[in-house]
Image: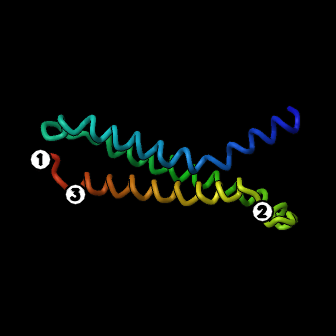
Amino acid sequence: MNATGTHRRHRVLYWAGVALGPAAWAVSTQTVYSFAAQACTKSFPATMIIAAVLVIVAAAGSIISFRAVRRDAAAEWQDVQGGRARNFMAWVGVGAGVLFALVIANQMTAALMISPCLR
């Protein structure tokens, strides 16, 4: 693989938290909404398992973005202009991944505590 292909592949790592966090939250929310009508008649423990897996997915996006920043930390100090835009985007990805992991965990906690029959 040439240097351009490697560079392009590594560039995706910076965006992992920005993409995986909101995507995991969207899948989690739609899953809970799709089972909402049947939740009062039957218990769906699978939704809690799916939510737990999606918390891990959102956190993984954050970790991937963080590792991308750490990989280029030495190069950032050598840059005369003080860094690059992709490092900023990676830090946004770290924050977004953590934020969306917390949002999914909060929604999962609320679903555990509140009866689905209360409409």
Please tell me whether mark 3 sits on a helix, a strand or a loop: helix
Image spot of residue 30 (x, y percent): 34, 38
**Is residue 35 visible in the rendered structure shown here?**
yes
Q: Earlier in the sequence, mark 3 or mark 1?
A: 3
* Amino acid type shown at disc 1: Arg
Badge 2: residue crowd in 10 Å (few <14, some 14–19, many ≥20): some
Q: Earlier in the sequence, mark 3 or mark 2?
A: 2
Please tell me whether mark 2 sits on a helix, a strand or a loop: loop
Is label 2 or label 1 in front? 2
For the rendered model, the colour scheme is rainbow
Q: Which mark is residue 44?
A: none
Residue with the mark numbered 3:
113
Image spot of residue 102 (x, y percent): 42, 59
- CA separation in Å, label 3 and label 2: 45 Å
Q: Is residue 66 left or right of residue 76?
A: left
The quadrant of the rendering that contains the N terminus is top right
* Amino acid type shown at disc 2: Gly
* Residue displayed at 64% across by 53% down: 65
Residue 63 versus residue 4: which sits nearer the camera? 4
Residue 107 versus residue 45: which sits nearer the camera? 107
Q: Which mark is residue 83?
A: 2
**Is residue 46 visible in the rendered structure shown here?**
no
Evaluate if marks 3 and 1 touch, with contact meaning CB atoms under 8 Å apart: no
Image spot of residue 95 (x, y percent): 55, 60
* Residue displayed at 25% across by 39% down: 44
Residue with the mark numbered 1:
119
- CA separation in Å, label 2 and label 1: 51 Å
Q: Is residue 22 left or right of residue 2?
A: left
Please tell me whether mark 1 sits on a helix, a strand or a loop: loop
- CA separation in Å, label 3 and label 1: 14 Å
